[in-house]
Amino acid sequence: MSRSTRAAGRRAAPRASRSRHRTPRARTASKAIGLTLLSALVPGSGLLMGGRKKLGAFVLTISIGLLLIGAYVGLTRRDSILAFAVSPRQLLIASAAVVGLGICWIWVVVASHKLLRPVSMTYTGRLAGSLFVGLLCFGIAVPTTVAAQTVMAQRDLVGSVFQSEGDSKSATRPKVDKKDPWANTPRLNLLLLGADDGVGRQGTRTDTVIVASIDTKTGATSLISLSRNWMRMPFPADSPLHKVYPDGFWNPDLGNVEQPEFYLDAMYENIPKLHPGILGETDNEGADVLKVAVGEALGLDIDYYMQVNLAGFRQIIDAVGGITVNVNYKVPIGGDYGDGPGSNSHKKPSGYIEPGPDQKLDGYHALWFARGRYGLTDPSRQERQRCTIHALVNSVNPATLVTKYQQIAAAGKQLLRTDIPQEILGAFIELGLKVKSAPVSNVDLDKSKNFPTGKNPDYEAMRALIQKAISPKPKPTASASAPTATATKKPSSGTTTKKPSSKPTVTPGTAENLNDACAYNPTESGN
């Protein structure tokens, strides 16, 4: 056989590689677009249909495997997720992984379309396919970017607010087992401080001082509010401050009169100025002073504090879309008596929040709902503060967290300061989930009897009331008569029904459910 004959035979023989791809590529442009969409929904399927069977099977296996692992971890390993969500290092790795998966997903879609589109296409078909693939890639890139930004926002929040135990200093923080922080802590006592260092004020004063006493097994929480004008705040006998103020924080030389510079809300600023470093090394001496004094006054061991900046509080209310509360009487916006630490000259309020049930308040009005006091009593203000916290807890839901988490995290950086270490954040989040589904109550300290004025509160009597309120209640015996059940409608946002009704009488020292305390009752005056 001559050379020319052999060459002609080779040209006539079909190429095996082309014959394999002829069938998969023999489809319309519209069908190719549909299969590309399927390849985006089920990564790897497009590669399989395009003839890249080994690669397609590998990608499909990885995709299904990741979905199964995600479902397993989400359903059975909540502890691991919580620990992961508060670890800056793991969050950084997660952010990189999210970006990497997004890039791989886009590559799979583009590669699948190249294999699935017809060999011969019109200009219109090619343009339509390219536009569709571009839209798919954009649809993948946007949520991937948002997810990565959300993870980084969480990392930034954790790193900014919560320091590791080795990187922070506290004179009052307890030593706990990092693996099981609540093993020897039946009740966690958390000091909540509302600090105001706004325009026109000198220094920082803590207008809001609340103790949240939490049952670590059930999440049941008792809120205890302290009046800002309490004097003679005591210190434990073994505290260096007890040697300086053996009869509590006040100045005997001034006599038994109101001493604004020795009020509870002045301690955060004044004691560190008068006695710097008296408690030892700490990142926030004012907060440590209050932990020691409040714990002694109420007969509780204060474990940690959370300090809320009021400007950040306003931002976080706006970030969650506002809160819904019952307004029982006119609440002033602004206004100043012109006396006390941090006060300006006397001025009247610029306006009022009008009474009404189920009122939706933005951050600005929620802030004044919580702190407005001109013409009103301190107990009414304390109750509104507790109702604000209650409404905020009830307003946060999964949908809000998903859609507005970056705004919430940004506000949280400005909102919080705390001595809670990073190492136990997972346990704190678990406890927070219990608190959200458990009853929250208010402990009445009996103002009329125990602190009719701020000059000389009866701390011993208040300690007895608190112990009575938070002590475990005995289980009813079988012979005890069952109380008559009364059907009540549980509110969805920290409020009750719109029907005006008198609040139940609260016995001092008992725990009043906040759903009742925050109900709409227009007969109240706030005085």
Image (tube, grey):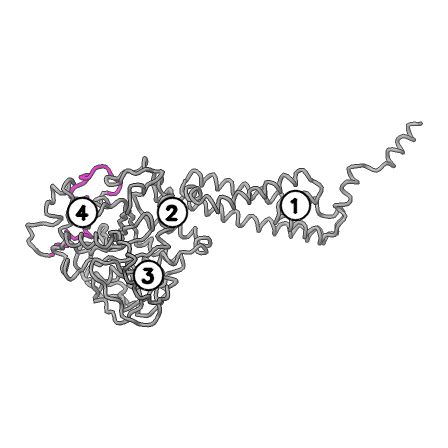
In this view of the protein, which residue sits in the foreground, 469 or 290? 469
Image-based side of 183 in relation to 509, left or right: right
Residue 175, x across and y down, in percent: 28, 38
Q: Which residue position is annotated with label 3?
A: 366
Residue 197, visible in the rendered structure: no
User: Is residue 424 located in the magenta-colored stretch of the structure?
Assistant: no
In this view of the protein, which residue sits in the foreground, 312 or 359? 359
Element under disc 3: helix
Q: Earlier in the sequence, mark 4 or mark 2?
A: 4
Q: Identify residue type, mark 3.
A: Ala
Which callout, 2 or 3, points to the residue nearer the camera? 2
In this view of the protein, which residue sits in the foreground, 430 or 43? 430
Residue 175, visible in the rendered structure: yes
Q: Earlier in the sequence, mark 3 or mark 4?
A: 4
Q: Identify residue type, mark 4.
A: Glu
Q: Which residue position is annotated with label 1?
A: 45
Inter-mark Cα distance, 1 to 2: 40 Å
Q: Which residue position is annotated with label 2?
A: 430
